[in-house]
Each structure stands twice: as C-alpha cells, then as structure tokens.
Image (cartoon, rainbow, N blue to C red):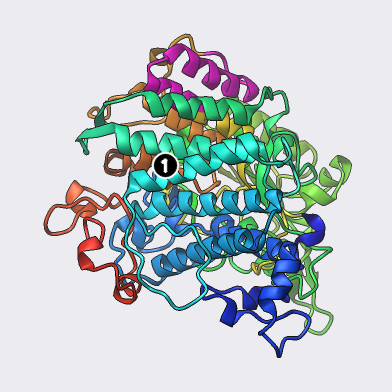
Amino acid sequence: MKQLKYSFIGLASILMMTGCSDFLDPRNLSNPDNSDEYFSEHPEQIRPVAYDAIRFIAEHIDMLDQASDLYINPRGANDGVFSMFIQTPDDGTVESYYKNIYSGINKANCMIHYAGDNAELIAEGKFLRALGYYYLTQQFGAVPYVDFYIQNARRDFPRTPLNEIYENVLADCEDIYNNSPLPARDHTGKASKQSVAALAAKVALAAAWDLDTELIDAEAGTYSVKDTKRFKEAAAWAEKAIDGIELTMPFAEKWAWNNEGNVEEIFSAQYDRNGYPGNTETGGHSLMYNYTAFTTKVTDTGIKGNGSGGTNLMSAKSASLFEHGDQRFDGTFMTKIYNAPRKVSLTTGLPAEAEWDKGYMAWYNMSVEEQESLPVGVRFYSPGTTIEEAEADIREMIRLGQAKKFANNTYGVNIPFAAIISGTDVIKWEFNTNGTMPTSQKISFMDFCGAGDNNGVTVTKYDDPASGPVTAKQCYRDIPLFHVSEMYLTAAEAYLLAGDEGASLTKINAVRKRAGLGNLTSYSAYEAPYVTNVKFVFTPLDLVLDERARECYAERTRYFDLRRTKQLVRYNLEFSRFIKSVNNMSNAQGEIKWYRPIPQAEIDSNTAMTNADQNPGY
C-alpha cells in the first residue's frame, strides 16, 4: 500500500457519488466515454481511491470525541456543539460526515463493481464498505444501506432497519474471513483477515448492545440483557483479531513514531511524506496538533499547539484517570517539554522564531546528553505523584541547570513550571530566575487549564518528528483504527455482557499488566482514581470503560463507547462541565439525543425519506 498511497491524486476527482458519467479516463481526461472499459481492465486503479476515503474517518474529531467525559475546550465558551447537544439537522459538520462516509462506501462499491473475478479486490471493497457502515450506524443508527455502485443521479434510498444493516455487514465479514484470499495479517494499510475480524468484533458488539439490551434508566445508565448470543459472537471475533498476540511490547514503544506497522497494529490509514507528490505542508493530517492546549504561536515558543482556544485538552476526569505508575500516562502524553531558545532578528535584535528542534522536538531529535543541556519549559508529573517525588526531580533539574526562568525572554515559555496533574487540585512550581527551588502552589484544575499559555498536557501518539512548527496538515504518522490491545478490551466487554466475568477480567488484567499495574482479583477490587458524586455507583462496566479510556485515549472512540453502552447520559451528567440535567440532552418533547441528526439536506434530497425518518430529539 505504500506505493499506492498517493496514486489516487489523478483519480480522486473522478470517483464521485454519481457514477460512470462522472468518470474521466486517466489516460485521456477529455474523454470519459471509455471509463467502463478502462476500469474493467484495470480495476486495481480504483483501490487507492477507495482506501483513501478512510482518511476522513481517521482524522475526524468532533463527532467522535465530543459529548464524552475525556476532553474539554479550555478557553472556549463551551466544549463544542456536540458536547452541548445543540447540534441541528442543518449542522455542516454532520452533513460533511454523512456525505463523506457515503462517498467512501460508493467508492468501495465501485471497486467491487469493476473487480470482475478478482476475489481479493472484492473482499477489500466489502471490507471498506462494512467499515463505512460501522461508522455511520454508530452516529446515526438506521441509514440507507446501499450495496451496489451508484452510477446515476438516483435518490430513492429508504432507511434500512438497523438489524438488517448489522446482519449484512456481519455476513460480509464472515464470508471475507472464511473464503477470501486476503492475507492473515497486514501492516501496510491493506485489509487482512485480522482487520476483518476486528471490524466484525466491533460491529457484533454494537449490534448486541443495540438489539439485545434494553434501557431501564438513562440517568442511572441501567439496562437489561435480553440475549447473550451476539455478545458471545463479538468475543469470538475479538479473539480471532487478537490472533494469539500477547501484550509484551511496552506501551510507549507500541506508539513510537519509528515503530509504525508493529505486530499490535491491525489496520491503519496510511500516510507517507516521502511519497507525497504535492506540498507536504498540506498533504498529511493535523492530529499531531490536536489534543493539546493553546500555546500562542508555535513559531514563537517552539512548543506545538492548535491555534487560538485549544481543543480536546484533557478533562478533569482524564487528569485523574491514570493510576500512579501507569505507563500509559508517559506513553500517551508529553511529560517534559524543553524551553526552545529564540532566534534573534539580525535587523532589530529582538527575539524571532524559537528553535523548533530544541523545543518540543528535542525529545525526538536530540540525544539524552544534548537534552540535559537545555532548560526545561514544562514538566508534568502523573496523577498520584507525591510532592516529595516531584521536588526530588525538580532538584535534579536544578542541579543540571534546567529549572530556571529567563528574565530576558530569551526562551519561548513565559514562566517555566512543573506540575502534578490532577482533576481536583493541581500542584504547580513556577521556576525562579536564580534557579533555586521554587515554592509550590495549589490551584484548581480548571484554573490551571484556563490561565496563561503552555498549560495543557499534549498527546504524543501522532507526533511526527519531521513535521515543521506549524499547525497545517504536515503530520504523516499512520493513524491506527484497530489494534490488538483494543481488541483485548472489546473481548473483555463482550465476555462481561455474556456473563463470563472471569474471562473478561483476564483480558483486562492482561492490558493492565502491560501498563505496569497489578492484577485485579475481581471487579469489586477496582478503585477508580478519580472523584465522583455519591450517586455515581460503580459497576463492572465502568472498569471496562476506564480501561478503554486509558488504553485508547485520543483515538476517537469515546462517543461510540458511551452511546453503545447506554452510558451517554449518565457520564455526561457526572463529568460534563455544562450538562446539568437530562433535559440538556433532549428536545422539548423529552426525546434524548442518543444519535446525531440525519442531515436535513439528505432527507430533503432523498425521495424515499421524510422528516418522519429523523432521529429522536431533532
């Protein structure tokens, strides 16, 4: 797939929702009449275009993370329209999501249409189509199911019952897994039987929750299980996706920038800076600059940021979520940021751009010895770190000459500091000009997030050391959609709902062991490290969701997790800064907005749908 990554450039504009009349022969762009003949003879030419469509899914954030318990927008008036449940059927983000995924489904159907007897191409097309329907159903529930290539302006597609979509997708997955010539595993972005099993596990789990459980009380998050068959099927598919792979790789190594395509990666959206034929500052993605706080101009500070306001910074719950000693904290967040020296303007003598490679990127581009010669701008300690442990580390930085405030503004960070991150009170040390031991101060987490610059813990999972110091799309890290440890937790959830707590706990303990945490002897042995109200009574499902939050942080799975498990209302009432009542998540008629709205433009243009097909709440 590496060599196919950017061969779609000449074809992307010709594979649209409408069909053959929109095709242009890549050999003769002025003559579209022989496109049927060309693609029938060269169906493999459609493959990179169909795979490219998954990038939209991989890069999308708002509809996958907002309305969850893990992220906030620190400087905004709220945490986004989806977190406030004020989105409407006319929302442009919703419409874009809906149209882009359907466009990807049509490209997958196009690949199948022209594949002829190429069984591998057919299997890949069916996998990509199934992937699109998984993402659609988790956002919108029942949607029109189309399993053929749309070759005209037809617009009469009724909503297909949700159970039929799930059955169609799972039937395709089973057929591909059992009968196709796909490889057992693949780490280059191509569909494999392992990725098919991972998708089937997620679809079967969603189907089990949606079809075989019944909500009792939305605010309490209680439900009843009517049938366990699909949960058992989900567990079986997850085991196939795990494929006997044990979690022996250190968590940080799993996510290391120079370890892409490792044994735990199952399926990823692919990017390649060296192979991109255009401007590399715009040909990648921007996930490297998300999940962090506002940090003024990146070129001024040498510290990455995502523009004015900051989005998807860790919430108060996330700040207390990781138990002390959990290796996933250091493997997920940048805990030491070096204070980049500013270059000086030759004309004015004033500070100019900071040295990017000696700031944030020093972690990747400099040796340990070179790093020790740099001042530290920010040092974050994990939840549970004691004051004594933090101060011992600060004293060591002082000994190395790293913990010092520079009064002449030579360096980008205004006030270098160290802090113990907590969702209740943050302990912070602001470095002194003379390099002596600073005095600690206690501030609330929200004051810490909202005051000053460089105050948020930033995610490293998508860091690309070759990226320049701007917030454009110049990150070229591959983006995993499925990986093995997530399948462990998918299996854990499925086993739990199927009634096998022992098998469920075994999977959870395997994930915790790799993170450096002790085994839990039972679900009741778990003590959440964050603070909740008295009414929030912990259940075994909460442990599964906590482990998913720690293991899959910043992977755009959280909204699906909460909606699927019927905890969306309960978690927003407990952890949201703005949701105070279930009424905030409902319309005037009291209908809870479990799903996003079907785009009004799609209802209006689809002759087989009416406003009666709109999701409850809108």
Residue appearing at x 31%, y 44% in the figure: 572
Can you name the residue that lies furthest to the left here?
589
Is 377 or 558 nearer to us in this picture?
Answer: 558
Is the N terminus in the top left, top right, bottom left or bottom right quadrant?
A: bottom right
Q: Which residue is mark 1?
A: 167
Residue type indicated by callout 1 = Glu
Is 414 or 499 nearer to us in this picture?
Answer: 499
Task: Examine the residues drawn in magenta and state their main secondary structure.
Answer: helix
Image position of 143 (left or right of 570): right
Residue appearing at x 45%, y 45% in the figure: 168
- Residue 424 horizontal/vertical position (percent): 40, 37
Image position of 463 (left or right of 104): right
- Whether 382 is among the magenta residues is no
Is 425 or 497 nearer to us in this picture?
Answer: 497
Q: Residue 481, can we see it? A: yes
Compared to residue 113, the image places residue 217 above or below, namely above
Counting the numbered discs, the total is 1
- Residue 458 horizontal/vertical position (percent): 59, 50
- Residue 471 horizontal/vertical position (percent): 64, 67
- Residue 35 horizontal/vertical position (percent): 68, 78
* Range of magenta residues: 491-519
Residue 530, picture quadrant:
top left
Residue appearing at x 42%, y 40% in the figure: 561
Is the C terminus in the top left, top right, bottom left or bottom right quadrant?
A: bottom left
Residue appearing at x 66%, y 26% in the figure: 243
